[in-house]
Each structure stands twice: as C-alpha cells, then as structure tokens.
C-alpha cells in the first residue's frame, strides 16, 4: 500500500513532508483549505492552506511561550486578547493564569474552531467552554479597529502573512492593537522563521519601534515550524517589561502554580538573547 504524505508548501524552494497515518478531516472552511491528520510521531496535525499550523506533538512550545512570556512579564494580567488561535491551544494556556478574568479570542474562521474542537480537542482541552472565554468569530483587524475593550496582553496567533492573515502584519493593525492595550500592556506576535522569513520580522519590528517605546523579538524552536528558530514579536510602551528579572519571574511562576513542558523563567529570559543573524536583521 503506498504511504500518503502531506507536503507543506510555504517557501518557494523548500518543503517538508509529514506522513499521513490517518486522515481525520479534509475540506474547505469559509476561508481556508483545512486538513487534520494523525502522524505517528507528532500525534495530530492541523494544516491550513497547505501550511502546518499546530501539532499535538510540539504545540506546547509555541503556545506556552506565546502566552506565558508576556503574561508573566506583565505580572498581574486580568484581560487578554487573542487574534486568530482557532485551534484553542493558546487560549488554553492563557486561561491557566489565576489573575486572568477574561480572554477575548477573535478568530476569523469559525470552521477552524469547529474542526479543532471535533478532531483535535486535546489542544484546547476545554478552554472554549471556560466561563472566562469570550469567543468572537470575525476579522481580528476589524475588531481591533472597532472595540472599546482594553487588554493587558494581546497575542496575535495568526497564520502567515498571506491570504486572510496578511492584514495582521500591517502597521495600521499594530497601531489599533496599541490603542486597545491598557497602560503597561504587551503585544506579542507570530513572526515566522527568520532564517527564511527575515523580512517579515524586520517589517514587524520596524512597525513596533515606530509605535511603541520598545519593540523586539524572542526566539523559540518549534520542530514543525521548519527550517530553524521561530521569532515571536514583542512590543510594549513599558520598556522594562522585556527585561523582568529572573527572581521576579520565578516568584510569579511559582505563585501561578501550573505545570509547563517548555516555559521556565530561565527559558523566558534566554529567549530574548537573540542570535547575531537575528540581531543584525532587526537592529
Ligand atoms: N499557531 C499557528 C501558527 O503559529 O502558525 C497558528 C494557529 S491558528 C490555526 C491561526 C489562525 O489565524 C487560523 O485559525 C486563521 O483562521 C486565523 N486568522 C487568519 N487571519 C485572521 C484574521 N484576519 N482575523 C482573525 N483570525 C485570523
């Protein structure tokens, strides 16, 4: 029997392949082609428009570092906004913080939420049913322009800057996010693999620095975000938020009282130590 393989096509001249051991869903949502399949090594894999979004095997890296780094840096976050994040993994991590009173999640494509809940419920782990969850199905850019809500942390868990996700990498969108942040608020963004998508990071950090007192990035390694370390964008008008000391982070982490698989206060601090090729890109 010939083995079926999924080939990710995100870059012009590089691709990665994951074996499809069992196809769990394949179809088109209102906005995107979607696939969910099982892979012996990664567990279940969510693919949108032929790009790997998240896998049960390594989602903890990305979702923990996108959520806990700004939330622990802030120190007493009560409200958070997630733009995108249809699989619910980031929502699940944000809700682990005892100080969080509400997470508003604005996901363009209700179909992604539906298929994730149906075929990959392990990632959201009940987060969609948490009373503190305020799920809105709509365009995140439009929401950021119109909302009168204010947030302590905003996390842009978007697809890559193509199709519906493109608007979430614009200066106008980042300016709207700034408008929606409380004093001392922090914005973090999914900003690709700089080894291949360096210009995307340069553009975002340039926008951050034109809008906020502090703009930079921090690095994580997610095996299925292929071809190297991934950058998460960071912006805040509180320049000290990016350099919270280790003892403070350790105290906040201990007080929060939940387990992690990747995030630690030391990893938090180390993630902001940028490799020279990334420093040269953004400085
Ligand atoms: N963790 C993944 C990653 O790092 O690539 C992304 C997770 S999530 C699946 C990305 C989500 O962004 C998708 O569900 C997609 O529908 C959503 N999205 C894309 N453009 C959007 C927009 N303009 N407003 C809100 N959500 C959007």
Image (spheres, rainbow, N blue to C red):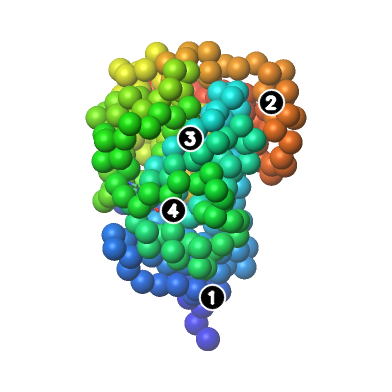
Q: Nearer the viewer, mark 2 or mark 3?
A: 3
| Quarter of the rendering containing residue 145 | top left
Using the rendered view, name the quadrant where residue 112 is placed: bottom left
| Distance CA(mark 1)–CA(mark 2) | 41 Å
Q: Could you say which disc has been placed on residue 80 in the image?
A: 3
Q: How many numbered discs, if any?
A: 4
Against 65, is 60 above or below? below
What crowding class fits label 3: few (fewer than 14 Cα within 10 Å), some (14-19), or many (20 or more)? Answer: many
Q: CA distance from mark 2 to mark 4?
A: 28 Å
Residue depth check, mark 1 versus mark 3: number of the one nearer the observer: 3
Q: Residue at x 29, y 59 (%)?
A: 31
Q: Position of residue 245 (x, y in %)?
A: 65, 16
The spot of residue 233 in percent (x, y) is 43, 30
Q: Which mark is residue 82?
A: none
Disc 1 or 3, which lies upstream in sequence? Answer: 1
Mark 4 or 3: the one toward you: 3
Question: Helix, strand, or loop for circle 2?
Answer: helix
Mark 1 neighbour class, 10 Å CA radius: few under 14, some 14 to 19, many 20 or more = few
Which structural element holds mark 1? strand
Is mark 1 in CB contact (under 8 Å) with mark 3? no
Tell me whether circle 1 and circle 2 mark residues in contact (CB < 8 Å): no
Are the residues tagged 4 and 3 within 8 Å (C-beta)?
no
Mark before the other along the chain sequence, 1 or 2? 1
Lateral position of residue 135 relative to residue 264, left or right:
left
Sequence-first disc among 1 and 4: 1
State the separation of the CA atoms marked 4 and 3. 15 Å
């Amino acid at each position: 029997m010939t083995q079926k393989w999924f080939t990710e096509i995100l870059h012009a001249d590089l691709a990665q392949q994951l074996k499809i051991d069992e196809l769990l869903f394949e179809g088109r949502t209102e906005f995107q082609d979607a696939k969910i399949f099982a892979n012996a090594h990664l567990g279940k894999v969510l693919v949108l428009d032929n790009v790997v979004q998240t896998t049960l095997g390594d989602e903890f890296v990305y979702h923990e570092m996108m959520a806990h780094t700004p939330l622990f840096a802030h120190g007493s976050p009560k409200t958070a906004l997630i733009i995108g994040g249809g699989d619910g993994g980031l929502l699940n991590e944000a809700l682990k913080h005892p100080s969080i009173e509400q997470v508003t999640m604005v996901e363009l494509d209700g179909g992604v939420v539906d298929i994730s809940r149906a075929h990959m419920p392990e990632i959201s782990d009940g987060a969609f049913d948490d009373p503190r969850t305020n799920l809105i199905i709509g365009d995140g850019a439009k929401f950021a322009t119109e909302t009168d809500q204010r947030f302590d942390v905003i996390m842009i868990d978007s697809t890559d800057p193509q199709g519906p996700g493109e608007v979430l990498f614009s200066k106008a969108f980042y300016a709207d996010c700034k408008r929606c942040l409380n004093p001392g608020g922090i914005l973090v963004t999914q900003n690709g693999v700089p080894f291949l998508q360096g210009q995307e990071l340069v553009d975002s950090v340039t926008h951050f620095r034109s809008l906020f007192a502090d703009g930079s990035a921090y690095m994580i390694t997610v095996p299925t975000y292929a071809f190297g370390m991934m950058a998460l964008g960071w912006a805040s008008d509180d320049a000290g938020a990016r350099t919270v000391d280790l003892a403070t982070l350790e105290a906040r982490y201990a007080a929060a009282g939940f387990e992690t698989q990747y995030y630690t206060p030391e990893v938090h601090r180390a993630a902001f130590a940028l490799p020279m090729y990334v420093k040269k890109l953004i400085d």
